[in-house]
Each structure stands twice: as C-alpha cells, then as structure tokens.
Image (tube, rainbow, N blue to C red):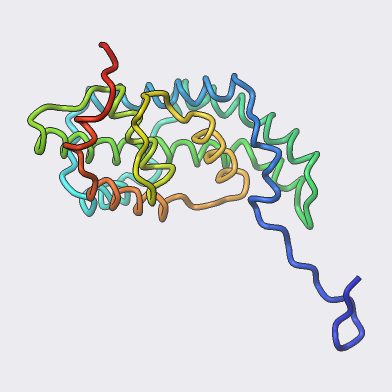
Amino acid sequence: MKKSSGGHPAAMPEPRIEDKTAFLLALPGTVERAAGEVVNQAFERLLSSDVHVTSAAEAKLLLADQEETEQLTDSIQRFVGIATPVARIALRGARFTRGPWVLAASSAVSIGVTVRNGVRELQAIAALLAHRFEQETGAPPEPVLLQKLTLEVYLKPRRPPDVSDLGLPLARLARRWIVSGVFGRNTRGKTEKALDAAERLDVESIAARAPSSGV
C-alpha cells in the first residue's frame, strides 16, 4: 500500500461510478422492453396533450415548474419493479469502497424518482423538436422519428443524432436511468444541454435523410 509522507497509508482514490457500473453493460431484455413501454406512454401522453414548447429556455422553465408532478404510471412502476432487482444483484457483486447496501436499500425509490424526472425531460425535448419540425418543414415529424431523435439528443447531446435507422436505444436509456437513480445523479444538467442541442439541430436535413417508418 502506498504510504503518505507522514507514515500513514495514503487514501486510495475512489473508483469512478462508471467503473462501478460496468456490470450494467448487458441488461436483460425485460428491462429494455420495460423502458420501451415508458417511452411509448410518455410520447402518447405528450402527443395527445396541448403542450407547446417553442424554445430551449421555455422548456427549461417548464421542467422547473413541473418538479415532481409526474404521476407514477403503470409503465414507470413496471420499469422500477423490473430494474430494481437487476440493480441490487449487480450491486452485491460489485466492489465498492463504501455503502453498497445503503445504495441497494434505497434503489427502488431513487430509480422511481429518476424515471419520473426522465419522462418529463424526454417530453420537454420532444415538444421542442416537434415545434421546430412544424415551423421549419411545415409538418410534424413522424412519431417514430420523433422518439428516435429525442432519445439520441437526450443520451448524446454533444454528438450529431444518428437517424440512419429508427430503432430506439432503449438499453442505453435504461442504463442511464438505473445508474443515475442508484447513485443519486441529477440528470437536469445533461437535459439542459440536450435542449440546447435540440434548438441548434438542422431539422430539415434530418427530415430529408431519415428513413420512413412506413406508417
């Protein structure tokens, strides 16, 4: 063990959260499907609502005003019920410098909070993108394209969104929610970056090159 100058063992740096969560790289298909149900329900509620978002700034204010107002819907409850045992089993097998059992004990509540926040964040991004499509292309985006684009921007706001196919990155979404929930990460900062990215997108170019869903 490395010694400090005073003769005491030097404190070893705590592993990054990303290192601790390598066990979540492969998620069961049931978790992905549950995440897909959450996404579908979130978009159905948005598209049937009268919510309109015209700018990233407006979306950020909307999220701040709606803090902790999202209901614990059936799809969210199902996701939490499936994801929590997966997270707890993984936590028991991971190496931590402190607190694995504390994390495991609170995981259901914290994952639920993260997913409720995540639903509102996805809806805010999608509402902004839908507005931009209508303004700049003269028509709303296909629902499948809106879902795909929203998730790509939400998960990777610094990268150009990949719309070469319309398959949804549900494993990445589920992993984000589980890790953020278990470790108490606040996702609002990343969401604000995603909203800024959505405001800068060339939606006309995206609409032109995106494959049709055939619906």
Q: Position of residue 79 (x, y in %)?
A: 54, 26
Q: Quadrant of the C terminus?
A: top left
Q: Relative to 112, say whether 76 is above or below.
A: above
Q: Residue at x 42, y 45 (%)?
A: 156
**From this viewpoint, which residue is outermost toward the top?**
215
Q: Is residue 3 left or right of residue 63?
A: right
Q: Nearer the viewer, residue 100 or 14?
A: 14
Q: Relative to 72, say whether 103 is above or below.
A: below
Q: Nearer the viewer, residue 131 or 84?
A: 131
Q: Is residue 134 left or right of residue 180?
A: left
* Corner quadrant of residue 161: top left
Q: Relative to 44, say whether 66 is above or below.
A: below
Q: Residue at x 89, y 79 (%)?
A: 3
Q: Quadrant of the N terminus?
A: bottom right
Q: Position of residue 13 (x, y in %)?
A: 74, 67
* Corner quadrant of residue 39: top left
Q: Nearer the viewer, residue 171 or 59?
A: 171
Q: Residue at x 62, y 44 (%)?
A: 182
Q: Nearer the viewer, residue 213 or 10?
A: 213
Q: Residue at x 34, y 53 (%)?
A: 192
Q: Position of residue 205 (x, y in %)?
A: 20, 37
Q: Is residue 1 left or right of residue 11?
A: right
Q: Position of residue 20 (x, y in %)?
A: 70, 48
Q: Relative to 44, say whether 97 is above or below.
A: below
Count of marks, rendered view: 0
